[in-house]
Amino acid sequence: MGQHMDNQKVVAGVILAGGLARRMGNQDKGLVLYKGRPLVSYPINALSGVTELILINANRNLAVYKAFGLPVIVDKSTDFAGPLAGILSAMLYTTAEILVVVPCDSPLIKAEHLHKLLKMRAKTNADVAVAFDGERLHPVFLAIKTSLRSSLQNYLDNGQRKVEKWLKQHRVVTVDFSDQPQVFRNINTLTELDALEASTQSQ
């Protein structure tokens, strides 16, 4: 058991599927079908190219999520505290040193994009690597040190919720994806789902 993985720190992944998806009529977004498959299956594929330790953070339909054969973790609080609550649950669950965070509603993300986040974080030894599309940060696409768990716990215990505000307390490297900003396209409404399906038909 004591083998080192080429000096790589152990990496785990978490898919954030714990939100209420109000703009989708409170449907469980990770289970909405995109091209005939549940949205959550796309980040599972992307993460499986990076790590075998994949967690799903969900707060509803737990049996359905468990059917994907991965550990399903719920938020510690019951008030749908946003992405940070899911990130904290994953940090408390895993012993991995680095956590890759992806949302459940961006089906165009691939393993190569996650590798880029991991590589930049390792290269700079930053606390967090966050995706940047040339115009804005995408603070739910992260490679993050799990040693930040107590900092995150304190932040949430103080009633704070904003991801970017918490990130600013740490050493952050932004990872430039301005050559392919479309990979962060996410789906908030069924109209957006139809539009994305139509726009990628030809690919």
Image (tube, rainbow, N blue to C red):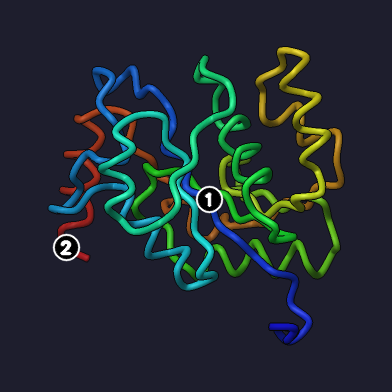
Residue 59, percent from left and from top: 41, 30
Residue drawn at x 25%, y 25% is: 27
Q: Amino acid at mark 1?
A: Val
**Residue to which mark 2 is pinned:** 202
Q: Is residue 199 above or below residue 139?
A: below
Q: Amino acid at mark 2?
A: Ser
Residue drawn at x 13%, y 53% is: 36
**Residue to which mark 1 is pinned:** 14
Residue 63, percent from left and from top: 28, 41
SS at badge 1: strand
Alpha carbons under labels 2 and 1: distance apart: 30 Å
Q: Is residue 30 above or below residue 159?
A: below
Q: Is residue 53 above or below residue 103?
A: below
| Pick the front one: 116 or 80 | 80
| Pick the front one: 50 or 76 | 76
Determine which of the numbered discs, if any, sits on residue 156 in the image: none
